[in-house]
Image (tube, coloured by chain):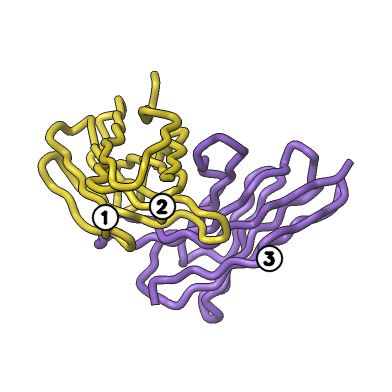
Chain colours: A yellow, B purple
Amino acid sequence: NAGVTQTPKFRVLKTGQSMTLLCAQDMNHEYMYWYRQDPGMGLRLIHYSVGEGTTAKGEVPDGYNVSRLKKQNFLLGLESAAPSQTSVYFCASSQIHKGQPYGYTFGSGTRLTVV
Amino acid sequence: QQQVKQSPQSLIVQKGGISIINCAYENTAFDYFPWYQQFPGKGPALLIAIRPDVSEKKEGRFTISFNKSAKQFSLHIMDSQPGDSATYFCAAYIYNQGGKLIFGQGTELSVKP
């Protein structure tokens, strides 16, 4: 029972390079989210998905793209990495039950450094 | 209007003391208020949560106090222990906006033995 798994755990990119962060969940959750965590700013929502094939923008979507081709996977892409994207990225998933989030679960994070 | 403001940014408490973290919000559409605990190198984990129709919720040493009219809520950790040392985040949630959480800025709690 892995929950939410993020890969990779660490990555160093050069400015302008691209990469994809993978999030996989095995709880059959409908909703998935990508957050970034920066010191003193809490977690900010980048993009989210309310079901397979759907995506929507969060608070800080610029410079990122996402895809949800399969229910269990949510991919976050950086097309041209910038130093401002140095952060810790968290994926989360949840189910909704009677109007409340149920089983909101976070992965262990991906620490990304852009030099 | 989507913001959740959290204070203090850091907190040092002696073992056995009470830790208090406060949050305030503006959007009255928020309908669920969880608190998350995060240890270094780990993702946030749900600690305790409350709905706006309840003024207080207690689970063990952790209590949420909720003041709907003031649009404020707080986390109280009774008998604080060194193992409680972590970063705590308050959050707020609106169901009809994809279930996304809006987080406070976080409070780094250190409990001294």
Q: Label 3, on which residue?
A: B8
> Alpha carbon of mark 1 to alpha carbon of mark 3: how far?
31 Å
Residue A52 image-quadrant placement: top left
Residue B29, percent from left and from top: 35, 72
The residue at which mark 1 appears reads as A63
- Residue A78 location in percent, x, y? 27, 45
Q: CA distance from mark 2 to mark 1?
A: 11 Å
Amino acid residing under circle 2: Pro
- Left or right relative to B10: residue A6: left
- Identify the residue shown where x is 46% and y is 44%: A88
Location of residue A21 with respect to B88 vertically, above or below? above
Residue ID for mark 2: A83
The amino acid type of the residue labelled 3 equals: Pro
What amino acid type should be assigned to the residue bearing mark 1? Gly
What residue is rendered at 39% in x and 64% in y?
A: B31
Residue A6 lies, in percent from the top left, at 37, 30
* CA neighbours of label 1 inside 10 A, class few (<14), some (14 to 19), many (20+): some
